[in-house]
Image: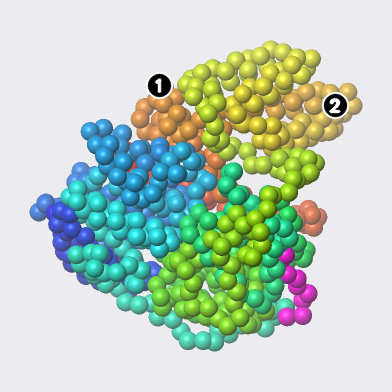
Amino acid sequence: MLEVQSLACKIARKEALFKEISFSLDPGGSILIEAGSGRGKSSLLFCIKGIFQGEKQYFGTLLFHQEPLDGETRKEIGLVLQNPHSQMISTLVHEELWFGATRRPAQKEEIHKRTVEILGLGPLLHKPVRTLSSGQKHMVAIGAAGIMNHRVLLMDEPFLYLDQMNITKVLAYIDYLRTLGTGVVVTSHPGVVAHDHFDRVLALGRPKPFPPFPVPGNEKAPAHGRPRGAITLTDTGFAHGKRPIITHLNLDVKPGCELWISGENGSGKTTLLKILSGETEPDYGTVTQQEGLRISTITQNPDRSFFEPSVQGEMIAGIRKKNRNIPLTESEKRDINAVLDRVGLGDKQDLSPFRLSFGEKVFLGAAQAWMLCPDFVFVDDILGFLDARERVVLLQFLRELKQRTGCGLVFTSSRGLYPQADGSTLLSMDACKGKGTPGTQKVKPPKVPWAKRLFRAFKTPAFDYVTTHSWLHRANPLTKMALSMLSWVLLYNGGGRFFPAMAALLLAYYLSGGLGIKRFLGDSRFFLIQALFFSVFMPLFRWDIYAVYEGAMAGCRVWLFFIPVIVMMRTTTVAEWMSLFNRILPKRARLSMGIAFGLLPCITAEAKEILHLQKQRGLVPDRQDLLHPRRLFYGLRAVFVPLLIVIEDISCLAGLSVKLRGHDQ
């Protein structure tokens, strides 16, 4: 069915990414292609699917049923991307699974039923995609591609992010697809799965060379004498929705320690790590850490950690932070070269971080941590991105960083325990699930004081889809739009005296959607601050003290104007946005606009994570920068450029995902 003859890939004038590889795939057959990071696994599958990157040159022949592979026949080939974070293009899981089926209405519901059953997606069907863990998102992406029932399915490292139980489910799902006559090509790191699950196993490329230890260090960077404190959790608890994850957890993470947090996909490992780093507040309890504590996080989505146009630029930012205009010294240049050589990126300093493989991005994140000399390094379940040899290299690298600077290491893992050093500590999420610290009795969470609850509600993020069964969720998108337009007409035809009644009416409209008063407070905070801003600065612009009232009314008008917009965002899914735009826009525009509106929650969540990572690296402007315009400029650039990058990245990958779902005519 599919024949690959002497396929090779070369990047510009450099050495070949991978040399000639040949194989043939029969209907219902399966092939496993194993290789380490950066050896060309994704490039191979992208070439077969027809996704080409300008700097890569391919040589060889591709045939489909004895005919040259072209754009039309490539529609019979599906592809699962290795990064699930940015390729989700629907609001709810069940919509994501059925998105591709709209192109093939003759598909049987049996495939959908068996997909949900084998992959264990039943409990997730009505959940927002954004709230899933990385492993759960990957399972959804695999199921969405399988439901399309392609003749050939290419799976780019489908075992990333997954615990052992979910790896077994994916293997069972591959067997099911093969019974339907689908040929499957899977790429993976060596040693992840047994070879007897596949008809044929191929090796791609050579192992990446790593120089031996030690790594020369910057003698000015370590701060052994700098005071540093522990991160302490006291009676801390958090939940996913109404499901408690941990109650009354007491944990003391000290500098120089090595802590391993293990658990299955969706058990709350990442949430606990975010609580420790200060990105997320627990539902109750206290988190104590010393002011100015430096933390470096290597996230599950490494794309969100890069903000510079080159690998070398990322390393310079780790040293210079907001003062990147200051030239590097010769010793600093030598340190950067030595660290990058150690992680196998010495020959890729001028390359964009986004052009690296997943595993190479992980190593770049570790190299950044080396230059930052932090008090703690958090590694969020990314050891599965590497093969056994690369994993050993990364662990040695981070442990030498701990020995050199005295920092603490905190790892999360969904595949059991990797080789640990003496003195390391294990915390099992399964043992703590809803029971608190191991050995303690299960107790009810304490009541949080109303003032604290009110303050937390005022900080909740905006533009987040909420799953309830209100009449607004069931209403037609045109009805929601009509109600919004009616409220805008009333606002702009009524004066300031009318605003209190309008505010009460819009509050009732908001609450009738099942959104709750806490979200209303959180959604209103920005616009109330804006009303205060108008009331202060309008008199300054007009040189008229009586303009205070006019400014306050202008700010309130904007606040009331956006309430219906937020209600629309919180109660409308991507599918509903598409049905709304379907009446007035052609197909491509409908897809683009629907996905753009539906992905706003995803973009706002990613922006929050980016700002936190920027703060960890000292790139966010602070009060001192206000007095130094040049430093303020570099700080603002460090914030806004990554936000533009994430919007572009999500948009591009969403467009690619639309194509992969069959909407590519």
Q: Are marks 2 and 1 in contact (CB under 8 Å)?
A: no
Q: Is residue 277 above or below residue 451?
A: below
Q: Is residue 433 left or right of residue 224?
A: left
Query: What is the x, y in percent for residue 46?
Result: 30, 56
Q: Is residue 528 left or right of residue 580?
A: right
- Cα gap from disc 2 to disc 1, whole angstroms: 44 Å
Q: Residue at x 77, y 76 (%)?
A: 226
Query: What is the x, y in percent for residue 116?
Result: 35, 45
Q: Is residue 351 left or right of residue 607?
A: left
In the rendered image, which residue does mark 2 sit on? Answer: 548
Q: Is residue 145 visible?
A: no
Q: Is residue 577 above or below residue 623?
A: above
Q: Which three-letter amino acid code belongs to the residue tagged 1?
A: Arg
Q: Residue at x 59, y 64 (%)?
A: 297
Range of residues picked out in magenta:
224-232
In the rendered image, which residue does mark 1 sit on? Answer: 583
Q: How is the image coloured?
A: rainbow
Disc ID at residue 291: none
Rendering quarter of residue 515: top right
Q: Residue at x 39, y 57 (%)?
A: 166
Q: Residue at x 72, y 78 (%)?
A: 223
Rendering quarter of residue 453: top right
Q: In front here: 579 or 621?
A: 579
